[in-house]
Image (cartoon, rainbow, N blue to C red):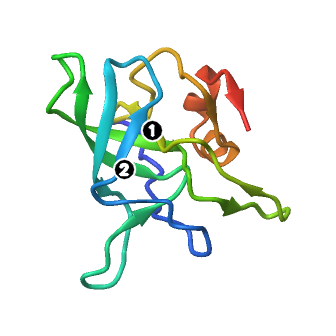
Amino acid sequence: MPEKLNVVGSRKGLTPGIQHETRVVVADNSGAKEAQVIGIYGYHGVLRRVPFANVGDLIMVSVKKGTPEVRKQKFKAVIVRQRMPYRRPDGTWIAFEDNAVVIVNPDGSPKGTEIRGPIAREAAERWPKIAGIATLVI
């Protein structure tokens, strides 16, 4: 039986950076280039409120641009960068140039073998397998 994924929803107090229908860049070499958020795991919100996610959250994406093998398919992904500035417990604020995700397998391991660009420390702490192949953790 596969390990249980850490699908705790968006943590209270963090800035909602990504929501439903957001287009995101895929930061790994799985074949996908751009994806659209279609679901957020572990989100328990209010009726009619648009669900949101933060860095390190597990989401469901639909690949919009990429190789023909992965286009028009749904995958689980982890958010590794967000444009919206968010505050860390030490008081510093951090924001990235783009919204980016890494596509993961059902067991939580990355589908690709390398990650382009930096990833947030929050995502690296929550997903150690992603941190293992990341080139830069900020």
Task: Indicate left or right for 24 with 138 as reference.
Answer: left
- Which residue matches tag 2? 59
Tell me if residue 73 comes above or below residue 132 in the rendering.
Answer: below
Residue extending furthest toward the right: 90
Where residue 113 sits: x, y (%)?
A: 48, 14
Residue extending furthest toward the front: 97
Choose between 32 and 42: the one closer to the eye.
32
Secondary structure of residue under mark 2: strand
Mark closer to the observer (2, 1) = 1
How far apart are the alpha carbons under marks 2 and 1? 9 Å
Tell me if residue 7 comes above or below residue 44 in the rendering.
Answer: above
Secondary structure of residue under mark 1: strand
Tell me if residue 89 comes above or below residue 134 in the rendering.
Answer: below
- Which residue matches tag 1? 101
For label 2, the crowd category at 10 Å Cα-Cα, with few meaning under 14, some 14 to 19 and many 20 or more, is many
Choose between 42 and 49: the one closer to the eye.
49
Where residue 93 sits: x, y (%)?
A: 75, 59
Task: Indicate left or right for 137 with 92 as reference.
Answer: left
Identify the residue shown where x is 59% and y is 42%. Answer: 97
